[in-house]
Amino acid sequence: MNASPLATTAAAAEHFDVLIVGAGISGVGAAYHMTKQCPGKTFVVLEALESFGGTWLTHKYPGIRSDSDLYTFGYRFKPWVGPPIATAEEILSYMGEVIEDNDLASHIRYRHKILDASWSSEANLWTVDAVREDTGERVAFTTNFLWMCQGYYRQSAGYTPEWPGMADFKGRIIHPQTWPDDPQLEGKKVVVIGSGATAATLIPNIADSCAHVTMLQRSPTYFVPGRNAIELADQLRELDVEEAWIHEIVRRKILHDQAAFTQRSFHEPEVVKQELLAGVSAFVGPEVTAEHFTPRYRPWRQRIAFVPDGDIFRAVGAGKASVVTDEIDRFVENGILLKSGKVLEADVVITATGFDLNVLGDIAFTVDGKPLDFSQSVTYRGMMFTGVPNLVWVFGYFRASWTLRADLIADFVCRLLGHMDRKGAKKVTVALRPEDRDMPLLPWIDPENFNPGYLMRGLHLLPRRGDKPEWQHTQDYWAEKDELPAIDLDEACFVYEGAPARTPVAAE
């Protein structure tokens, strides 16, 4: 009987100085920074999917686009020249140019799904076991340093709550994250459950083909409708300013305005709320805004999405789409029974209900033979973790573009690698200092300040934070842009240890 490829012992492991997990927006950026800031080091990027892109590759639903501007979601080193809110296709093209222009393709291994990662303090190495999903072959790698760029949610499937009666429904249930090739929406009554950026994107992009589409929401979300253009960028282009300058100037202007808006949302939340509602009311009127687009929470307790040209509100105003604010009692044969007693008829239900948090890529980690319980560690600035050596995780911002933090962390990782070389250190961990021993340990993030559903469902899986800046993921780009580059790599939080075990030389 032939052994399964998964059971076959891997051949001798390939070794790299750095192993980057994931070829999404963070992983491609990490690879770029390795080539520029650590040119003498070897590295590999392992990606489970068939190509680069992450979210922008896996999400196929109609209209898939960014919910923040590409001047800040794009890399600081690669000028963005398109409209600020970009389609998945445009973002993939942009990332492809980064890969091609910097010869990164040779460093990326696609269809390599990582199964487990084990740290040995004796060897001062990570051993990473993976399977090639195209051949079933088991492969192994060793690396001095793991750079986790796999994102924060499970790519394979989205989150759909278990409502009573779902098996009784005679129609079709689709999650946007696993969009089918043949959704068959033409002439159908469609209900989209959810009120976030995904629902706001989907609805105007399917409204023309459906008999009717209804957004069913338990509670409203804040949106910012506006023209999908930046006047300053257009003016600078008319003046023939170089794109690199335009990118930097516009980027700084957006970040300046975002900082002011975020502060206002804390200091004058009611004024900001009324401004946001006025933007929606301009499309659908004050009565619809009051009934269906006035959230229960203050601005910025959840992410605020930009709606280009107010497209979902225009669809509602034109009667192509409608909104129902109610709660689900159960599914029935012909649709959804609401708690108000009304039946919302549907042929197709689309559950734009979010995703499942994914902690470190669902990889089984061990440290010196002991399984890693990530939730029992304490985070150092949201990127390193007590008791976990030679590992950094990219976890971006909620109130600013993800990639801003990916670039900052890349600088930190490259600086840390160089610092370890100069010290002759092969291992670095972060550890609580004596003055931190009695520090209260709290959830990863304060739910009073930010509480989206996916985070609340998975908060117990994440590391804990302390009450000092070093032991928190602050979510504050405007502070971190100065703080992270100024980190003293010899401060007491960092513990460095010696040389790797010698590899026996085979007798000649």
Image (cartoon, grey):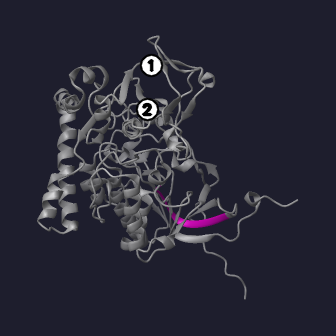
Tell me if 119 is positioned left or right of 193 in this view.
right
Residue drawn at x 70%, y 70% is: 11
Q: Residues within 10 Å of mark 1 (few under 14, many from 20)?
A: some
Residue drawn at x 42%, y 53% is: 394
In magenta, the rendered stretch is: 139-149
The answer to the question of whether label 1 and label 2 lie on touching residues, with beta carbons closer than 8 A, is no
Q: Mark 1, mark 2: which one is toward the viewer?
A: 1
Q: Nearer the viewer, residue 453 or 40?
A: 453
Measured as percent of width and height from the top left, residue 42 is found at 49, 74
Tally the marks: 2
The amino acid type, in three-letter code, at marker 1 is Glu
Tell me if 218 is positioned left or right of 135 in this view.
left
The image quadrant where one finds the C terminus is bottom right
- Give the secondary structure at mark 2: helix
The residue that mark 1 highlights is 327
Measured as percent of width and height from the top left, residue 96 is found at 42, 65
The residue that mark 2 highlights is 453
The amino acid type, in three-letter code, at marker 2 is Gly
Is 231 included in the stretch rendered in magenta?
no
* Mark pair 1, 2: CA separation: 16 Å
- Give the secondary structure at mark 1: loop
The image quadrant where one finds the N terminus is bottom right
Q: Main secondary structure of the magenta part?
A: strand
